Amino acid sequence: MNLAHDLLIQARHLAGLDAGRPKQANLRRASSAAYYSLFHFLIWESARIVPKTPAGLRDRVCRTFHHNEMKQVCLPFSRGTLTPVVAALLHGPPSREIRSIAKIFVDLQEIRHNADYDLAAHFSRLETLQTIERSESAQAAWGRIRNSDEANVFLAALAFGARWAK
Amino acid sequence: MAALVQPDVLETTIRGIVDSIVPPKGVRLRRIDFANDHSGDAAVYIVFAVSKRIPLTKARVRDLSSLSDTVADPIWQLPDGPIPYVRFEDVR
């Protein structure tokens, strides 16, 4: 997805600015962009379960995703303790890839919140580059499971959030 | 009264997990904070201090990502455990 890719490029660009002592504003924006890259990557993938037509339908659906709902979906996948609804659809524990993606999403969302709102937080270039690397790593891991049943279930869970548990 | 001074079992377990991990060169444990994260979920922040004297390379970044996973993965497995967040701070 172009937006997710471009956000990663933007994050790397911002994290590499200011030789010597990097500006906090650049590191914060880089960290935030790394999270948003993964966020948009996942919601765009989730939109695959929506019909392609009419034009604009998928874009509209993408706007329904909620950060905290997605986090709450990711938590049981991260722990490997799936909810009964998800467990009934999958025939085994979540793969290492899906667990890794879920964990990174949760982690990066917390970083993004601090980057955007916690003025007391200090960001280092090293930690920012690590945040970017983890966003890239999650998207690469997705490529390895993209066509699996568990990927489809994960995407549906992200799309339907709390309503999924009914 | 005795129950009040007993260390929390989960906290002790987490400290044991973190203490058992040997960080790479130039990295040391700075602190472990138990708190709620931005959305109110129980969390533990494990903060490492990283020496700025070691050059910043891609391998260095990957080493720290690996350390993050090594520390956080066993905490994710704990029943009712907090969400683990591993963080790195620069030190001179």
Image (tube, grey):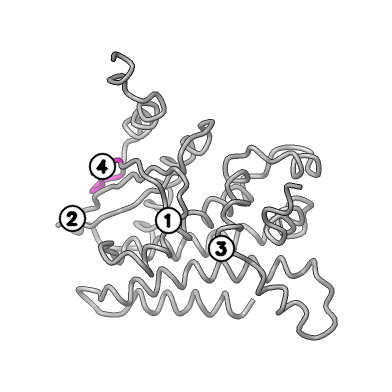
Q: Position of residue A140 (x, y in %)?
A: 59, 62
Residues under numbered marks 2 and 3 in contact, where contact means CB atoms less than 8 Å apart? no
Of B80 and B86, which appears nearest the observer?
B80
The three-letter code of the residue at mark 2 reads Val
A157 relative to A114 in the view: left or right? right
Instruction: Name the residue located 74 percent from the left edge and 37 percent from the top edge.
Output: A92
Residue, disc 4: B31
Residue, disc 2: B91
Of B2 and A90, which appears nearest the observer?
B2
Q: Position of residue A55 (x, y in %)?
A: 80, 86
Give the label on residue A97, or none. Answer: none
Tell which tag, 4 or 2, sits nearer the viewer. 4
* Above or below, comparing residue B8 to residue B87 in the picture: above
- Alpha-carbon span between mark 2 and mark 3: 33 Å
Q: Residues within 10 Å of mark 4 (few under 14, many from 20)?
A: few
Judged by its main secondary structure, the magenta piece is strand
SS at mark 3 in the image: helix
Stretch in magenta: B24-32
The three-letter code of the residue at mark 1 reads His
- Alpha-carbon span between mark 1 and mark 3: 12 Å
Q: Earlier in the sequence, mark 2 or mark 1?
A: 1
Tell which tag, 2 or 1, sits nearer the viewer. 1
Residue, disc 1: B38
* Above or below, comparing residue A22 to residue A84 in the picture: below
Residue, disc 3: A67
SS at mark 4 in the image: strand
| Residue A126 lies in the magenta stretch | no
Residues under numbered marks 4 and 3 in contact, where contact means CB atoms less than 8 Å apart? no
A60 relative to B50 in the view: left or right? right
